[in-house]
Image (cartoon, helix red, strand yellow):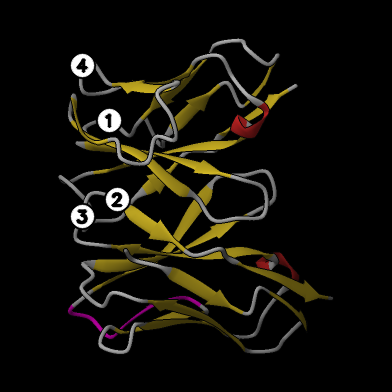
Amino acid sequence: GAGVSQSPRYKVAKRGQDVALRCDPISGHVSLFWYQQALGQGPEFLTYFQNEAQLDKSGLPSDRFFAERPEGSVSTLKIQRTQQEDSAVYLCASSSRTGTGTEAFFGQGTRLTVV
Amino acid sequence: KQEVTQIPAALSVPEGENLVLNCSFTDSAIYNLQWFRQDPGKGLTSLLLIQSSQREQTSGRLNASLDKSSGRSTLYIAASQPGDSATYLCAVDNYGQNFVFGPGTRLSVLP
């Protein structure tokens, strides 16, 4: 596609509910990143994929967070038993080479509100 | 652990002024640095990417410089316009597998 696409754009979840956020990277991009952005702050790294391999998940805040990219293209970030502190914008980015070192392109984000 | 700071946190200028946004990072062993723009409720738009071997990059009215040894980058915006109002973020590629972002500078350009 022309850019990184994320869905849904907005999600309201009741506390305790499970949610799944989707990211469609730019076609052919090897690297995919997930970031969490709290209001008024810069994005914080969550996890990184190189094709289908999850090479770094050090930023995932708890074991309630799980990400996958089974075929090396679309990725899903799943949050189980959502808590109010999970409310944030979740950003996905992709780049054409392995790791970083090239320009990263970001999607519009999914704004998650846990009530 | 790499830490990125940005000064000022917020800036308000009249239209037409030239301005400088600052970004500092603690670990100079970086691969590159990227400046982004974020409009309210939107994702990040890439503005400029500076490789570690480069000193500056230019795109239109924007010029970004990089001094890796001192851990600093600046984003210069010439002849600012109201449409430049947004939050500007710098992100450091830390020779790892992720970018480390600063908190951003919120810019308002008044007509």
Q: Are marks 3 and 4 on the same chain?
A: no
Above-or-below relation of B90 to A78: below
Q: Position of residue A74 (x, y in %)?
A: 32, 21
Q: Separation of disc 2 and disc 4 at Cα? A: 21 Å
Q: Do labels 1 and 4 share a chain?
A: yes
Q: Which mark is residue B96?
A: 3
Q: Read off the chain for label 3.
A: B
Q: Which of marks 1 and 2 is in front?
A: 2
Looking at the picture, which amino acid does disc 3 mark? Gly
Decide if residue B97 is in sight here.
Answer: yes
Badge 4 crowding class, 10 Å Cα cut-off, few under 14, some 14 to 19, many 20 or more, is few
Q: Nearer the viewer, mark 2 or mark 4?
A: 2
Q: Which mark is residue A27?
A: 1
Q: Read off the chain for label 2.
A: B
Q: In this view, does B70 lie to the left or right of B91?
A: left
Looking at the picture, which amino acid does disc 4 mark? Glu
Q: Residue A96 carries which label?
A: none
Q: Nearer the viewer, residue B23 or B75?
A: B23
Q: What stretch is highlighted in magenta?
A: B53-60
Q: Residue B98 carries which label?
A: 2
Q: Name the residue under label 4.
A: A71
